[in-house]
């Protein structure tokens, strides 16, 4: 006898029981449907009723379905509590979840999730068009696979992994997923790792993951086992830091690739310039080229006249003064691999990018307007190692710290006053952006100590609501 196929309608209360019956699942969860409702006249009796209902739900597995409207097809949040998500029940969810077109949040609490279940969820999340928030809590795993949810191409923007006994090894993998020299997560905005037995080593790995991550805004490490060493490593990522050997090598590789791309473009443009000495344009980009046999000084005078950006003339002139002052400094100038082609200067400001290339006794100028929306998108994709504010001092390369992270929660750990000074120094060095909220309560120092009060005062000045 052929098994009946069920086409999901997007009505959770209807689809889940039918799929459970089809797969022979006897333990069908109860449903707690949350619909928007008009104000209740008898608030006291309604409160008692809801409290009694909630108390009973804790005794049995249930699915909490939050709807956007009265329409049963408007499910926006789904919580799986106490229902063991095994091989059969994950098949039910695998079928139901993609049919929920308005689903934004999914939460699992004590659902007995296994490694294979996590992998199935990872494959299912991209099929849910609007799902951006995922919480898997109180689901410890023997193998550390939660980091795979922080892959570079995940659509998730909010991830909570509380109470999963992740430990230092799991934190190491999560740190690598946040960023490494070759890739970084570019979607995740908030990450909750509270109550996970993460110590100093794990915190140091997460700090390493924050070095080149320019997306994460909120990070909670509440109630772990982090001491001064781990906290200091986190504080160091917030201010200017020296690149490691591997990071320096990757930066050189990226600069080389960039110069080779310019070399290829220049090779094509030189062929065009043989046919026409007039100004050339690189396709649809906003970059203009000025070429000629004159020396560099002559070309510097002509370049602004040929740039068709009247509104940006003042910025260009101001920028050129900065260019002259910075010619003796290291601004990432690299020799191209093509013979006879040299990048004389690569200089970038918020308003424009200026590139000078000398080839075959000609000096070429690229003047790019960074305010152009197309160029803004290109800048967002740029690797942090190519940050124009990189500096070289005393034989080391220094990168500006992470100023994207706005909230860091380290309450309930093992910090002493020794780790407060690095945080204060990093906060003082952050000129633009940076931390707005730093939670350090319930650690091993009194909240009336001087340096802690200085940190609170500094953060208070940054508070946009103060």
Image (tube, rainbow, N blue to C red):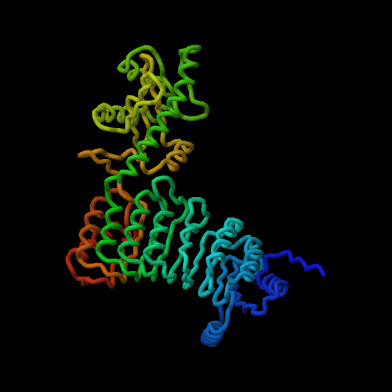
**Residue at x 25% of width, y 31% of height:** 329
Q: Outermost residue, front direction?
A: 142
**Residue at x 56% of width, y 80% of height:** 40
Give the position of the C terminus as an image quadrant.
bottom left
Q: Is residue 240 above or below residue 255?
A: below
Q: Is residue 404 above or below residue 328?
A: below
Any part of residue 460 in sight: no
Q: Quadrant of residue 411?
A: bottom left
Q: Position of residue 372 (x, y in %)?
A: 45, 35
Q: Position of residue 216 (x, y in %)?
A: 41, 55
**Residue at x 76% of width, y 66% of height:** 5
Left or right of 62 on screen, residue 405 = left
Q: Is 299 in front, or is 154?
A: 154
Any part of residue 82 in sight: yes
Q: Is 316 in front, or is 405?
A: 405
Q: Position of residue 19 (x, y in %)?
A: 70, 71
Q: Is 449 in front, or is 335?
A: 335
**Residue at x 48% of width, y 54% of height:** 151
């Amino acid at each position: 006898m052929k098994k009946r196929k069920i086409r999901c309608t997007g009505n959770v209360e209807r689809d889940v029981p039918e799929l459970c019956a089809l797969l022979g699942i006897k333990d069908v969860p109860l449903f707690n449907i949350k619909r928007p409702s008009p104000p209740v006249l008898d608030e006291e009796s309604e409160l008692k009723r809801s409290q009694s209902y909630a108390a009973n739900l804790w005794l049995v597995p249930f699915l909490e379905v939050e709807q956007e409207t009265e329409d049963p097809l408007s499910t926006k949040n789904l919580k799986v509590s106490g229902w063991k998500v095994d091989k059969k029940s994950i098949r039910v969810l695998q079928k139901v979840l993609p049919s929920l077109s308005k689903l934004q949040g999914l939460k699992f609490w004590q659902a007995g999730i296994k490694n294979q279940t996590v992998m199935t969820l990872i494959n299912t999340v991209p099929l849910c068009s609007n799902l951006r928030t995922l919480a898997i809590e109180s689901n410890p795993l023997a193998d550390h696979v939660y980091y795979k949810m922080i892959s570079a191409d995940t659509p998730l923007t909010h991830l909570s992994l509380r109470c999963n006994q992740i430990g230092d090894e799991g934190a190491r993998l999560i740190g690598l997923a946040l960023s490494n020299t070759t890739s970084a997560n570019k979607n995740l905005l908030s990450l909750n790792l509270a109550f996970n037995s993460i110590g100093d080593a794990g915190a140091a790995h997460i700090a390493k993951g924050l070095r080149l991550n320019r997306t994460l805004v909120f990070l909670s490490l509440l109630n772990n086992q982090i001491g001064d060493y781990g906290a200091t490593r986190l504080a160091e990522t917030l201010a200017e830091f020296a690149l490691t050997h591997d990071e320096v090598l990757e930066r050189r590789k990226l600069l080389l690739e960039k110069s080779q791309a310019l070399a290829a473009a220049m090779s094509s443009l030189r062929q065009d310039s043989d046919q026409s000495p007039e100004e050339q344009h690189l396709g649809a980009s906003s970059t203009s080229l000025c070429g000629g046999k004159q020396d560099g000084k002559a070309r510097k005078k002509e370049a602004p006249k040929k740039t068709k950006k009247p509104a940006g003339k003042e910025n260009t002139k101001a920028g050129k003064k900065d260019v002259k002052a910075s010619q003796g400094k290291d601004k990432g100038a690299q020799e191209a691999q093509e013979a006879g082609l040299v990048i004389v200067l690569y200089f970038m400001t918020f308003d424009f990018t200026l590139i000078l290339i000398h080839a075959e006794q000609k000096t070429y100028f690229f003047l790019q307007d960074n305010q152009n929306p197309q160029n803004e998108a290109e800048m967002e994709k740029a690797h942090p190692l190519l940050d124009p504010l990189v500096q070289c001092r005393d034989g080391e390369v220094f990168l500006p710290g992470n100023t994207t992270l706005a909230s860091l929660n380290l309450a309930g750990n093992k910090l002493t006053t020794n780790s407060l000074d690095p945080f204060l120094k990093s906060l003082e060095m952050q000129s633009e952006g940076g931390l707005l909220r730093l939670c350090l309560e319930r650690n091993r120092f009194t909240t009336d100590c001087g340096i802690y009060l200085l940190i609170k005062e500094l953060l208070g000045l940054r508070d946009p609501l103060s």
